[in-house]
Image (cartoon, rainbow, N blue to C red):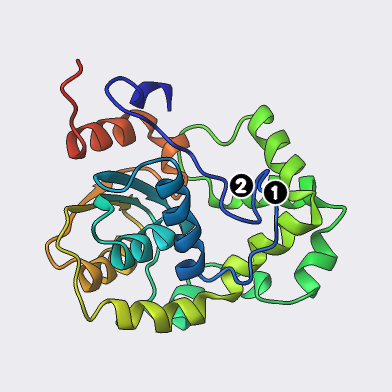
Amino acid sequence: MPSLLPGRTVIAIDLPGLGDSTGNPPSMTKTVLATYVHKLLDHLGHHENVQVVGHDFGLNVAYPLAAQHRDQVAGLFLMDGGLVGKNLKFATLASASWHFSFFMQNPLAEELVAGRVETFLTRFFQSVKTAGENVSDDELAEFVRVFSRPQVLHAGFELYRTLTQDEAANTKLQDTPLTIPVHMITQAALADLFLPPIHDAAPHATFAVVPGAGHCLVHEAPDRVLAEINAFYPTSTP
């Protein structure tokens, strides 16, 4: 974030029910979460020309935000995530990793992880690491802190449990393609899975593959991520 600040206002959001946010949203569908983000941006006075960056589930919230509030969002910069909808079904996405099926188990997933959050997250981050640095000890401690809150642990799993609803909602939204600039960067291993669905949402979207990196692009290829963001959202500030 500090590297992005020159010439910009940067807003990082704890989505409702996650991180240190309070309250209990009525649903963790991404259209509902996008409505929260839209209202927050309005409250902060950002009614238009918002340049959005979204990774993983941030990608899944960014798309309905742009699709439902087209006057507010000026561009989407997306990183390594599967946008369910017309041509990417949840069943296909779930086959990409074991954790999709596990997180869907309600309330079993919470019951097995509660009280073992550090053990679970340590193993989870090890399983998705490909190159470069993994999450630091300080970052892991912060993840453990927030996910040790029962509300946050449940909300995190609900992000996955609502993906079939997201699939139906996005299928309808994709009937009206985005016309704003859209760019996505992704790992090579899942490029064939992640890139085509973005064209369902934005036919003129552009793409780049980050060689050697895995899912945690910000950790594994931070310089490349910053360069891509700065190229897509240039500022006049050196």
Residue nearest the viewer, comparing 154 with 131: 154
Q: Would residue 171 be seen by someone viewing this image from the given angle?
A: yes
Q: Is residue 170 above or below residue 206?
A: below
Q: Amino acid at mark 1?
A: Leu
Q: In x, y percent, where is residue 158?
A: 64, 69
Q: Determine the residue located farthest toward the right in the rendered image.
A: 115
Residue 117 placement, left or right of 58? right
Residue nearest the viewer, comparing 67 with 94: 67
Q: Determine the residue located farthest toward the top in the rendered image.
A: 238
Do the residues under discs 1 and 2 have CB atoms within 8 angstroms?
yes
Residue nearest the viewer, comparing 155 with 122: 155
Residue ID for mark 1: 121
Residue at 19% x, 15% y is: 238
Quarter of the figure with residue 28 = bottom right
Residue at 61% x, 46% y is: 126
Assign a secondary structure to mark 2: helix
Residue 23 placement, left or right of 15? right
Residue at 27% x, 22% y is: 7
Residue nearest the viewer, comparing 182 with 237: 237
Q: Amino acid at mark 2?
A: Phe
Residue ID for mark 2: 125
Residue at 40% x, 49% y is: 42
Q: In x, y percent, where is residue 223?
A: 33, 28
Quarter of the figure with residue 230 = top left
Residue 60 placement, left or right of 16? left
Q: In x, y percent, where is residue 11?
A: 44, 36
As drawn, the label of residue 66 is none
Label 2 crowd bin: few (<14), some (14–19), many (20+), radius 10 Å? some
Q: In x, y percent, where is residue 83?
A: 37, 68
